[in-house]
Image: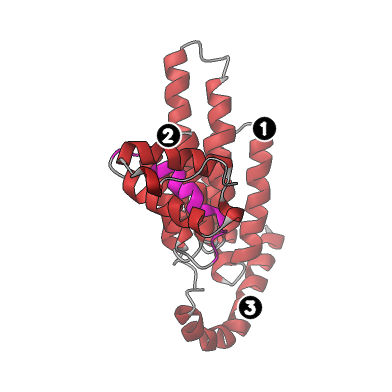
Amino acid sequence: MIRKTIAIALIGVFGFIKAPVEKSLDAAQERARLRNAPLDLGLRERVGQMGFLAALSGFRSPLAAYLWIEANNAWERTEWGRMAGLFDTVTTLQPRSLLYWDMAAWHMAWNASIAALQDTSQPSEALRIRSQRQYFKLGRDYLERGIKNNPESSLLYRSLAILLRDKFEDHCGAGEAFLKASLLPDAPPYITRFAGYELAKCPGREKMAYELLKRIYDEGPEGRKPALIATLQELEKKLDVPDAQRVNSGDH
């Protein structure tokens, strides 16, 4: 109890000393979107009094890192509920960390969902599938909340697109997410091509898909992947593109 009291006091003193410096940085952090989300009582309930005080005193990053390790320990023990709770706390503490959002979504939508489907303690296949889909939704929720906190990064849009494509089989949603990612400055070049592939499978979006992929094709041989040419040819048939304007299957 004495050690706990001393630790709380030291954290409080440290926070008091650094407060003037932090105050001078507030305006610049706000302009750069580097300020973290405000802490609430829900966080206090999850991390306890010492953890909450540590967060208030400027130790959000090391506290988040510690809890991230705990979340990975929970993963190794297949404690999915505890892992999700820890991920919620970590992303609350560090909402500008792309890694935390991305990995939390991956653990939920891939690892936990597979474990739920293969859970031998649940004899009902229907309930296993239902549990699996709930984990898909949790993964999607992490990515969508991460995007709200980091709208200028393509990474989470890309991960959302992959999740929608592979787990929900939502080609329209995946195409839109890939497309949004492609418009951001840090997007890899292949993202536009992936957007075209998914939109080609989305009823009503074939023309946009054709325009995206045709633009890549027209840029030169480097972008003329076999899958891109095959998709373009399928779209040309659907859209009744004149023969003279169609791509050549040998152009790659």
As measured in the structure, the alpha-carbon distance from the residue carrying label 1 to the one carrying label 2 is: 27 Å
Residue mark closest to the camera, 1 vs 2? 2
Element at label 2: loop
- The answer to which of marks 2 and 3 sits earlier in the sequence is 3
- Circles 1 and 2: CB atoms closer than 8 Å: no
Between marks 2 and 3 in the image, the one whose residue lies nearer the viewer: 2
Who's the residue at 59% across and 60% down the image? 50
The quadrant of the image that shows the N terminus is: bottom right
Residue type beneath disc 2: Phe
Disc 1 designates what residue?
Answer: 77
Q: Relative to 28, is 182 above or below?
A: above
The one nearer the camera, 210 or 69, is 210
- Whether residue 53 appears in magenta in the rendering, the answer is no
Q: Which residue is mark 2?
A: 168
Q: Pointer 3: what residue? A: 13
Mark closer to the observer (3, 1)? 1
Between residue 135 and residue 239, name the one nearer to us. Answer: 239
Q: Residue at x 42, y 53 (%)?
A: 212
Dot 2: within a 10 Å radius of its alpha carbon, few (fewer than 14), some, or many (20 or more) residues?
Answer: some
The residue lying toward the viewer, choosing from 177 and 140, is: 177
Q: Amino acid at mark 3?
A: Val
